[in-house]
Image (spheres, helix red, strand yellow):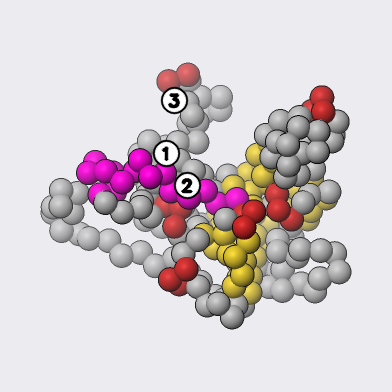
Amino acid sequence: RNSLVVGARSRDARFCGDYLGVYPPVFCDGCTKPIPPKIYELPWHKPRKDPKIYGTSEFVGVTFANFWRAHAACARNAIAIKANELSMEVLHPSYWSQTAWIDTDVAARFYIPAPDPSWRNADDCGDMDCDGLRHVLMHDRDGTLLRLSPSDALQPSSSVVSYTPSIIEASKCSFQVPWNAYLCRNLHLRMLVIESRDPDSFDR
């Protein structure tokens, strides 16, 4: 709430590097760690406990500044909001309002990585992709998160949605290649949880 998140200090080559602004939270049992974490807990953003079924996060009054794709001085990338690429099981919805953008490329605002193919194994997710990065939802409550230029009208009820063509309405969504995600307008998506409660749900 009411935060300023800054990427690069300058376009000067001396400040060249990959910058990341925010990972929307993942909620899990006992996964909170002090910052900085101990060396054996790195990478710090990797969930090491089972995720909770329910959870949402609210971001209010966040300003992002100086995030650029293909930094002119060194062709490095900066991403303002990125889905956690190490979260296999779930990425909980996030809700945004009163968002502001300062000197930030539209292409650098979001990025949702594809699931890691190595997760397709008997110990993790079987012969299919793990669900986490397939159901990312960033919802724009007031139109400020997804106002792509200052001249655009505010369009509340817009969302950034991970690459899931089976649930997308083509008339309301457009695929944004730099984000690896869909931009959807007036499409009211929510997370639906279906969980097996059978005793052998982890074994079969």
The kind of secondary structure the magenta stretch mainly shows is loop
User: Is residue 124 magenta-colored?
Assistant: yes
Numbered circle sitting on residue 26: 2
Give left or right: position of 27 versus 14.
left
* Residue that appears at 60% across and 77% down: 172
Q: Do we see residue 138 in this rendering? A: no
In the foreground, 113 or 26: 113
Question: Do the residues under discs 1 and 2 have CB atoms within 8 angstroms?
Answer: yes
* Residue that appears at 81% across and 63% down: 149
Give left or right: position of 85 versus 176.
left
Label 3, on which residue? 41
In the foreground, 131 or 49: 131
Q: Earlier in the sequence, mark 3 or mark 2?
A: 2
As measured in the structure, the alpha-carbon distance from the residue carrying label 3 to the one carrying label 2 is: 16 Å
* Residue that appears at 27% across and 61% down: 195
Q: Is residue 174 above or below residue 96?
A: below
Question: Do the residues under discs 3 and 2 have CB atoms within 8 angstroms?
Answer: no
As measured in the structure, the alpha-carbon distance from the residue carrying label 1 to the one carrying label 2 is: 8 Å
Per the image, label 2 sits on a secondary structure element best described as: loop
- Say what amino acid the circle numbered 1 marks: Pro
| Residue 186 place in picture, x, y as percent | 61, 78
As measured in the structure, the alpha-carbon distance from the residue carrying label 1 to the one carrying label 3 is: 10 Å
- Over which residues does the magenta segment extend? 111-126
- Say what amino acid the circle numbered 2 marks: Val
Q: Is residue 29 above or below residue 106?
A: above
User: Is residue 82 magenta-colored?
Assistant: no
Q: Earlier in the sequence, mark 1 or mark 3?
A: 3
- Say what amino acid the circle numbered 3 marks: Glu
Label 1, on which residue? 47
